[in-house]
Image: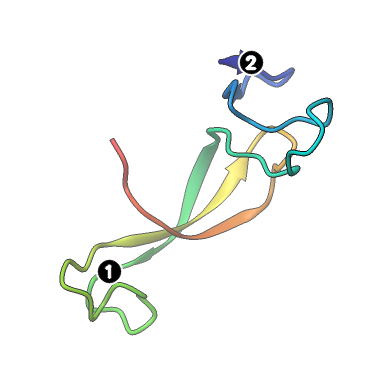
Amino acid sequence: MRRRWDGSIQSTNVPTYDKLGIGREDFALYRAMVIKVLYVDDPANISKNSQNPEVLYDCVILGGSASGQILSFCRLAS
């Protein structure tokens, strides 16, 4: 686990530009703020008709290189 310059956490499993042959996707953990809640009975909830529907969230990333990006359909994780 590494810390970025802004204090956010970057996993050591994250592909970086110095590792050839690996994509540039970032699988790090980010701090985010919930901006919208999609309850189980909400028509926009993509898990509405599944066997195990769950509350989903739209979040905006705070800090890091991806600051300001919106993540849709986030799930609660402990």
Q: Is residue 8 left or right of residue 44?
A: right
Q: Is residue 29 left or right of residue 41?
A: right
x, y percentage for residue 75? 35, 53
Which residue type does callout 1 highlight?
Tyr
Residue at the image point whose x is 58% and y is 27% from the top? 13
Q: Secondary structure at mark 1?
A: loop
Nearer to us in this view, 73 or 35: 73
Q: Is residue 42 left or right of residue 32?
A: left
Q: Is residue 62 above or below residue 47?
A: above
Residue at the image point whose x is 65% and y is 40% from the top? 26
Residue 39: which quarter of the image? bottom left
Residue 4: which quarter of the image? top right
Which residue type does callout 2 highlight?
Arg
The quadrant of the picture occupied by the N terminus is: top right
Nearer to us in this view, 65 or 11: 11
Q: Residues within 10 Å of mark 2 (few under 14, many from 20)?
A: few
Q: What's the coloring here? A: rainbow
Residue at the image point whose x is 58% and y is 33% from the top? 28
The quadrant of the picture occupied by the C terminus is: top left
Determine which of the numbered discs, if any, sits on residue 21 in the image.
Answer: none
Q: Is residue 58 above or below residue 8?
A: below
Q: Secondary structure at mark 2?
A: strand
Residue at the image point whose x is 55% and y is 35% from the top? 30
Earlier sequence position, callout 1 versus callout 2 = 2
Determine which of the numbered discs, if any, sits on residue 39 in the image.
Answer: 1
Residue annotated with mark 2 = 3
Nearer to us in this view, 75 or 63: 75
Judged by depth in the image, the label closer to the viewer, 1 or 2, is: 2
Q: Is residue 22 left or right of residue 49?
A: right
Please, which residue is most extreme toward the front here? 21
Q: How many marks?
A: 2
Q: Is residue 9 above or below residue 39?
A: above
